[in-house]
Image (spheres, rainbow, N blue to C red):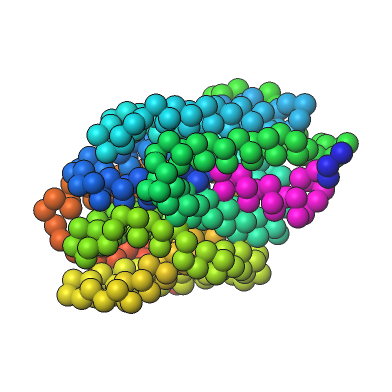
Amino acid sequence: MLPSVQQNAPIRYFTFFYLYFMQGVPSGFALTALANFLTGQHVPPAAIGAFASAVGLPWVIQLAWGPLIDRFSSSASGPYKRWVVLTQLLAFGASLLLLTIRDPAHQTGLLAAIFFTHSLFASVQDASVDALAISLVADHEKGRVNGFMRGGLLLGISFGAAVLSHLLHACGFAVATGAMSAVLLLFTLVFIATPLYGKENPGSFIEDQVASGSAFRQVFTRLIQNLLSRESLSVFGLVFSSYLCFSLFARSLSFHLIQFLGWSDKQLSVFQGSWGAAITLAVVLGGGYLADRVHLRKMYYCTITGLALFLVLFNGYLIGHSSEGWVKFGLVFWGLADPLFSVCSFPLLMAICDRRIAGSQFTAYMALINLSDVVGSFLCGWLLQVVFPPLIGLAAGFLLLVAISRQLLARAGKFAGL
């Protein structure tokens, strides 16, 4: 029998790594490879923004899945496992529907509908995996596990963006989607074969679960109380603002590179998905290790301030310059910095979650983060019709600096009043 996830640290890290890798592959394919491909095919930016929003919308309504999986989490194979397996199989089935599409550039409506369906199932899987991580992983290990989770997501996105973009151009849409489906099925089978616990399940874990008999009303009551707490609003408000600004920047940058600087969609997708993947992974895993060793809030504020300054400086440069070397440097830096922010912000969000409603509360945070990405994609699609792309990223950077300053001043005032 294989060692269990609970008892074996390497298996624990690898399990959460590939569960997030599975989420990243479709995301990289849809939001990078296909979005860039549609831009290169001169599909209107508003239509591409609507497509990206449809892909992300189910991750917004995943707020509803948390109480459901918490209420019915128990099973003979361990809490949450049946949810993960069921939704992974359904997501695999939805990915096979993409094989019905012959020309994605002229079937954007159907393309969006199928990816919406896939994201619907994947969002439940994501909520189940997050709840499993919060409940199964010790507090002193959450930073490292988040590093592996984010690293898996990053490499999955890289695979979906670079490898599947290459297959899309070289072999066609059907081959690319078939490869994506094969990857999803492979890791689903690996997870089914991996036990979560040894022969003796920890009783304290089962007792902590709201799912052991509490009503939905109790779950929702505790969820609302925790979401509206002062600490939750303070920490998460800035996280939400950050991801909204990041989304505006990322979408406007891809459009600028293809439509104004003459990059091909394949060149951009492969570069975004392949450069420095090993270095980026090392930074993410190292960031997770640091998150377990240093003051988490200091790391959080330093990272977000650095990202805001980068948005201002890089977009200011793009307004009047187009050096390919500096543009590639900016893309590399962004690939390193954005995941690092997640590694230091997600453990902070996990730390303020109530273990009794772990799936519900953390899923609510993730749903709202996904809402920021959907809103950013939709707004950017319309703004790009009237605003020069780097100005959108520049405005996002300034807005983020204002949000950081307000929160730091509020915290300084709070400590001064003690």
| Residue drawn where x is 25% and y is 69% of the image | 315
Q: Quadrant location of the N terminus?
A: top right
Query: What number of labels is visible?
Result: 0
Q: Is residue 223 magenta?
A: no
| Residue drawn where x is 76% and y is 30% of the image | 77
Find the magenta span and give its range: 4-22
Seen from the viewer's position, the closer of residues 20 and 213 is 20
- In the image, taking residue 276 as reference, residue 263 lies left or right, namely left
The picture places residue 278, in percent across and down from the top left corner, at 56, 66
Magenta stretch, overall SS: helix
- In the image, taking residue 294 as reference, residue 263 lies left or right, namely left
Residue 297 visible in rendering: no
| Residue drawn where x is 31% and y is 55% of the image | 265
Using the image, determine if residue 233 lies above or below residue 217. below
* Outermost residue to the front: 171
Using the image, determine if residue 345 lies above or below residue 110. below
* Outermost residue to the left: 386
The picture places residue 196, in percent across and down from the top left corner, at 76, 39
| Residue drawn where x is 20% and y is 58% of the image | 259
Q: Is residue 12 magenta?
A: yes
Seen from the viewer's position, the closer of residues 279 and 308 is 279
The picture places residue 115, in percent across and down from the top left corner, at 40, 34
Using the image, determine if residue 260 lies above or below residue 100. below
Quarter-of-image position of residue 258: bottom left
The picture places residue 19, in percent across and down from the top left corner, at 61, 44
Residue 273 visible in rendering: yes
